[in-house]
Image (cartoon, helix red, strand yellow):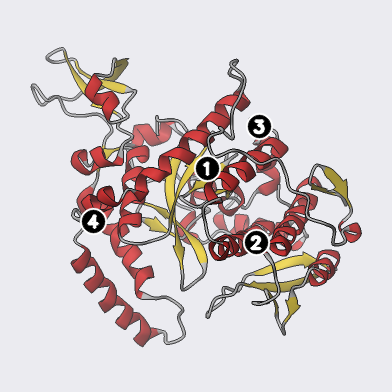
Amino acid sequence: MRKNISLFGLKTKPFSLDCCLSEELLNVLLKWGLKRGETCLVFPKDDTSIKQLHKIRDLVTGERNIRLNGSNTTEMSGSSRRVTDMQPVAHRPSRTLDSNQDPTAQPAVMTFESIFLKTLQSNFLHVMVYENPSLQKKALACIPIQELSRNAHEKLIQARKMDRGHALNEQDILLLELLNWFKCDFFQWVNNLPCSKCGGQTESKENLSPSEDDLRWDASRVENHFCNHCQFSNRFPRYNNPEKLLETRRGRCGEWSNCFTLFCRAVGFEARYIWDATDHVWTEVYSSSQQRWLHCDPCENVCDKPLLYEMGWGKKLSYIIAFSKDEVVDVTWRYSCKHEDLLPRRTQVKEAVLRETINNLNKVRQQSLTEGRRRELLERIIVELVEFISPKTPKPGELGGRVSGSVAWRVARGEIALEVFNASIGDHFRILSLWSSCSLLTLGPQSREI
């Protein structure tokens, strides 16, 4: 038997998440110190320690693994135990890392797994660039923040008149204003550059060697946009340094999300850089009013439509990892409603290795944080894990194809709207509804081409 339970955090306006928890897991969570409300489980403010929260996190992870594997066992700390057998035991710390040690250190021979883990390490280090105060100041100077804030304030007043019960605040609407301004006024999409010599059309040829200045701005790859009319090679360095992107203001997904994540940090949002192993990147922003992470794709000018890629673009997702100054999180399950289909595609790294790597990266990243901040992050991750247990139903806005990039480029990547299905959209909604009602609540690397 499963019960609908909301998992509350500790905020003044706690985030409520409806989910299905097994009777066994519910009883164990109560043993660990969570309190039962009328319609929710509550984290006690005074007596729930960090260690207890770690155990609760592991229990929810165990429930997820049960549904992933379709079995009655769950993997916990390297062993398998039934949920009903999990009783409070002394905390068993895993292997820790020195601050100077590479959490993803691998043998010299590069395997698919080692390449994947190297990508995690690269993104783990890269997001700290967004925390540079002078760079944030430079980014903020590019943003018409007063105009965007004024627009957000006016729209909030309108929203309150239309719906007095909404939970949005001005920051939520400011995020939407920032997204729209970035897409429409600041950044430019690049398919092929016009020839800088004759103005003619160009086509992509083999890459060119990066110059010293390219490498200075983290552009290890330089595209050759060749003009057949005047035989001129136009250089398009794929800059990975967001400071340079404030100047160039152009690129594809990689440049867009890189610069936009910096802007989010510059205006004060808690933001994550989201890396999708199937060749896309975007941003997540934490909403304090809704107490959850919001999907934000600056290329598409969309917010809070996480199923867009799977249901709209038709992407076969595998790994989606979030990186920020505070944490690394596997958020794959937020972006899929087809967990059973997704799971067999996760073959680049063993799940246990991925989990240990992420835990070790987080230990390194969080070792200087206060206990209060670590507790806050842990509470959030528990809420996220519970969210991941139950696949979502797609909203109409998540069923459209990609809009950024040329038609040829989108077709080549298979990201045009899914219009080849024989069944109607209504049929698909009925199938998804049936699939969800049958208790199939199971849960199941950084390319610069993006």
Badge 2 marks a residue whose secondary structure is helix
Badge 1 marks a residue whose secondary structure is loop
**Tag 4: amino acid:** Leu
* Dots 4, 3 in contact, CB < 8 A: no
Is 61 or 93 nearer to us in this picture?
Answer: 93
Q: What residue sits right under mark 4 in the picture?
A: 140
Residue 20, given in percent of the width and then of the height, sits at 74, 66
Marks 3 and 1, Cα distance to the nearest angstrom? 23 Å
Q: What residue sits right under mark 3 in the picture?
A: 349
Marks 4 and 3, Cα distance to the nearest angstrom? 39 Å
Q: Which mark is residue 302?
A: none
At 29% from the left and 22% from the top, the residue drawn is 222
Q: Look at discs 2 and 3 and give the one toward the viewer.
A: 2
**Mark 1 or mark 2, which has the lower sequence index?**
1
Q: What residue sits right under mark 2 in the picture?
A: 382
Q: Is residue 351 something that shows in the picture?
A: yes
Badge 3 marks a residue whose secondary structure is loop
**Tag 3: amino acid:** Val
